[in-house]
Image: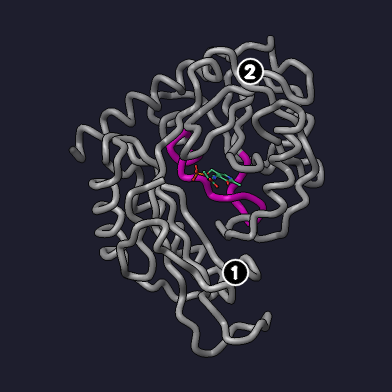
Amino acid sequence: MTARVFLNGQWLAPQDAHVSVMDRGFLFGDGVYEVIPVYSRQPFRLEQHLGRLQKSLDGIQLANPYSLDEWIGFVTQLAGEAEWEDQSLYIQVTRGPMAVRNHAFPKDVTPTALLLAEAMSTPPASQREQGIAAVSAADIRWLRCDLKTTSLLANCLLRQLAVSAGCVETVLFRDGFLTEGSASSIFVVKNGVLLAPIKNHLMLPGITYDVVLELAAQHGLPHEVRDVTEAETRDADELWMCSSTKEVLPIVTLDGRAVGDGTPGPAFARMYDWYQEFKAKVMRATA
Ligand code: PDD
């Protein structure tokens, strides 16, 4: 873990950073978070991540303890001093510690704000070259999956289904439609067209999802943002998962059945290259 963490305005050694057992984040999962990839010490899509943080805070009626500029300052400082060139920055803001355990929001409560860095662990090349296995499950989460809250128990249980089956991700379906993965956005490719579920309250508005769609538009890959059925997902030529930490990965089996011909598809190969080119360009521009 990082040499120093930012906790409530102070830079501390991780072992000196403490949070109260009465913190609502600990007792109720009453908080929100962000995961921001950093390449060569440059935060990737920082304003978009901080914008989503603000939306998540608004969604749980919690005032942001810091301005956008302050967050940019903290993140830039940490990205500059953490021990790795490529990092995954974690921000968490909870409603803070309460005097007595009570579900209702206390009147005077000071949010807890945490920022820390971890080494970015990009997926091994084998996952990109051979693809990954996924399982599927019913999306049992609540109806505000658009908020990036720390209440992640359902996501953890769903992700564990994949891990217990020796797989990487769990693809979620709700009422016959694709929503997303337990910790990723999911895309379908059918007959050369990229299909993306519409961003709504049932899925997280992924920052990587936006990048993938922007790249598809830029490079002329036909794409449709619309409801995607479970049947279409199971009948896909290609299935991709994407997130800030995994970038884009091809899913080659779903519930033990081959997706398409069971190997990473040609659309994925193009998207992967476009994504790497885009990253390199952005990093050069901000260096
Ligand atoms: N999770 N959907 C869910 C449920 C997620 O948890 C994530 C990412 C995504 C992809 O979002 P983005 O492209 O903005 O990273 C979609 C992060 C990485 C996490 O919880 O660690």
Residue pictured at 41% horizontal, 63% vertical:
17
Q: Which residues are magenta?
A: 197-212
**48 to 123, vertically: above or below:** below
Q: Residue 133: image x %, image y %?
A: 68, 23
Q: Name which quarter of the figure residue 188 lies in.
A: top right
**Residue behind mark 1:** 30
Task: Classify the position of the C terminus by image quarter.
Answer: top left
Count residues near mark 2 (Cα–Cα under 10 Å), then give few for <14, some for 14-19, many for 20+.
few
Q: Amino acid at mark 1?
A: Asp
Where disc 1 sits, the SS reads loop
Q: Residue 48: image x %, image y %?
A: 39, 51
Circles 2, 1 touching at the beta carbon (< 8 Å): no
Q: Nearer the viewer, residue 256 or 166?
A: 166
Please give left or right for residue 224 compared with residue 45 in the image. Answer: right
Residue pictured at 81% horizontal, 46% vertical:
175
**Residue behind mark 2:** 191
Task: Classify the position of the N terminus by image quarter.
Answer: top left
First-in-chain label (2 vs 1): 1
Of the four image quadrants, the one with ligand 1 is top right
